[in-house]
Image: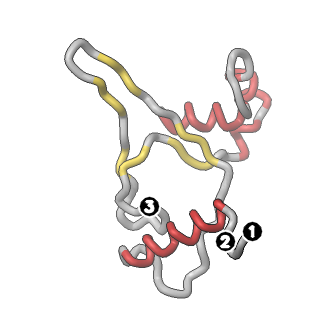
Amino acid sequence: MVGGELPDTERVQRDIEAEEFARGHIPQGSPPVEPRPAATVCLARSTTRRFDVLLLQRPVESRFAAGAHVFPGGTVDPEDSSAEAIDQVKDGTAGEPQAVFAALREAF
């Protein structure tokens, strides 16, 4: 800590937990949701009259960001690291191939 302030990640996590508690999505005293490797994809298209972006709504029962509108995505699963999955996305992609595969899988 510098000057008594929380590091950015800890401050953000604290703020999210406080917001989720205030909304009644998590009970007081429950352990925070552990972060997991995840991936997100932003699907957008431009037409002559507008710009469309695909958003999904999270289930209202979720412990994290319940009811929020989000881009498609989700947790990187162990299968996303398989040789077959990696071979499908390794050429021409930036970042971790298992995260790229997870983002594409979640989009479908």
Q: Which residue is mark 2?
A: 5
Q: Name the N-terminal-most of marks 2 and 3.
A: 2
Instruction: Residue 41 in the image: state x and y as whole percent.
Output: 51, 34
As helix, strand or loop, the secondary structure at mark 1 comes to loop
Q: Which mark is residue 65?
A: 3
| Crowdedness near tag 2: few (<14), some (14–19) or many (≥20) residues, C-alpha within 10 Å | few
Q: Which mark is residue 2?
A: 1
Quadrant position of residue 97: top right
Task: Look at the picture and state if 106 lies above or below 59.
Answer: above
Structure colour scheme: secondary structure
As helix, strand or loop, the secondary structure at mark 2 comes to loop
Q: Amino acid at mark 1?
A: Val
Which residue is depicted at the point 43% across and 71% down? 19
Instruction: Residue 20 in the image: state x and y as whole percent.
Output: 44, 71
Instruction: Residue 99 in the image: state x and y as whole percent.
Output: 67, 37
Residue furthest out toward the front: 3
Which residue is depicted at the point 74% across and 22% down? 90
Separation (CA) of disc 1 from disc 2:
6 Å
Q: Amino acid at mark 3?
A: Ala
Q: Amino acid at mark 2?
A: Glu
Instruction: Residue 63 in the image: state x and y as whole percent.
Output: 48, 68
| Crowdedness near tag 1: few (<14), some (14–19) or many (≥20) residues, C-alpha within 10 Å | few
Pair 2/3: label in front: 2
Quadrant position of residue 32: bottom right
| Crowdedness near tag 3: few (<14), some (14–19) or many (≥20) residues, C-alpha within 10 Å | some
Separation (CA) of disc 2 from disc 3:
25 Å
